[in-house]
Structures are given as structure tokens and as C-alpha cells.
Amino acid sequence: MLDKTFTIVDVETTGASPALGRIIEIGLLRVERGEVVATYKTLINPGQDIPEFITGMTGIRESDVLGAPTFEDIADTLLEYFEGATFVAHNAAFDYAFLKAEFKRLGYGFTLPRLCTVRLSRAVYPEHKRHNLSVLIERHGFACVSRHRAYDDAEVLWQFLQMLHQTLPEPDFQAHL
């Protein structure tokens, strides 16, 4: 896997529904041949209110996103980061669905191969019941500056992939991807 191109992604959103909610922050790392070659992070003006419980979880307030770019402003830039890459996220279906919905609103298609690090963790560590990101951080001692902030959470996934690559024999590592 680390010899391939992938983009590790995390998004923070206004809610749980891609049809109703919007992205308020994105963070990503583009990895080529095992090296981070580009990073990107930005707040995004969702054009809608940010619920208090989201602010409580992320620390992102409406005042923080007022001057931020809209998704339309950054869409073409994001597509460059995803070009030719595998989409990697923790609970990938969630992040992917939000990005797909945002691109669809702009009339863009968005289709990428995906790797879900929740599923990967379950496959590699079936003896553990919980595989959420907070548990992985604690279990493996990963560094995370600000939990529930997009770029910092994406960096944790990069640490997780590197750890797996270093600790699993290559055939086992490849078998889980």
C-alpha cells in the first residue's frame, strides 16, 4: 500500500447527513511511494448554521468560517489532491459521502477507490471491540494535537498506516488492504 498513491482525508461537518449537512473543515495528506508529498487544510464556509453540539465537539464556530472559502472555491484544488489516489479515511463511507455530495452540488462526479481504516483496524486487531479514532490514539500512543479537527485526525491515520507497515510482515499488510 505505501508504494501506491493515496490521499488520507478527514472532514468535519454540520451534521450526520450528507444530503442536509455541509463540510466545515477538511484536512488531507497526499502520499506517494510512502512519502507525504502534499498536505492541505482549511475551514470551509458551509453557508448554513453550525449546530452547538458540532461546535462543542470540534471547537469550530460560525464566526470561524465566515471568512473561509466555500466548497466551490476549493473544489478544483481538492480534485488535484485526489487525482489518481485511493481515498483513505476512518469510517470512509462518512467522509466520502460528504465529499461526493459537495461535488455533486457543483455538477462534478467523484469516484475513487476507498480504504476504510476502521475496517482495516478490525481486520488487523479482531481481538479488540472498539476501533474509533480516539481508541486507536490511546491504544497505539499516536500523537494528535487537536482531536476532531480534520487535519490532525488525518495525521493520526497516517501514523496508523505507517505503524501497520512497520509492524506487519509485508504479505500480511498487503492482505489487509
Image (tube, rainbow, N blue to C red):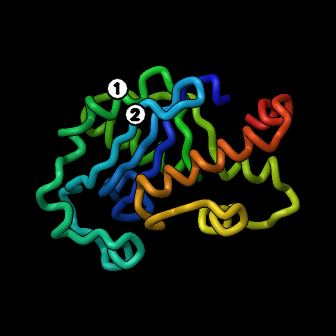
Residue shown at 32% from the left, 43% from the top: 102
Residue depth check, mark 2 versus mark 1: number of the one nearer the observer: 2
Q: Tell which of 166 and 110 is nearer to you.
A: 166
Residue 96, position as x, y percentages in the image: 48, 43
**Given the current orientation, which residue lies at the most extreme top position?**
84
Image mark count? 2
| SS assignment at label 2 | strand
Would residue 92 be seen by someone viewing this image from the given angle?
no
Quadrant location of the C terminus?
Answer: top right
Q: Tell which of 125 and 139 is nearer to you.
A: 139
Residue 103, position as x, y percentages in the image: 32, 36
Question: Which numbered tag is attached to residue 110?
Answer: none
Residue marked by disc 1? 80
Left or right: 154 in relation to 135: left
Residue type beneath disc 2: Ala
| SS assignment at label 1 | helix
Q: Residues within 10 Å of mark 1 (few under 14, many from 20)?
A: few
Q: Tell which of 18 and 25 is nearer to you.
A: 25
In the rendered view, tell whether residue 51 sits above or below residue 95.
Answer: below
Question: Which numbered tag is attached to residue 38?
Answer: 2
Q: Tell which of 72 and 3 is nearer to you.
A: 3
Left or right: 150 in relation to 67: right
Residue type beneath disc 1: Glu
Quadrant location of the N terminus?
Answer: top right
In the rendered view, tell whether residue 131 sits above or below residue 97.
Answer: below
**The image quarter in which residue 108 lies:** top left
Would residue 67 be seen by someone viewing this image from the given angle?
yes
Residue 116, position as x, y percentages in the image: 63, 44
Left or right: 31 in relation to 162: left
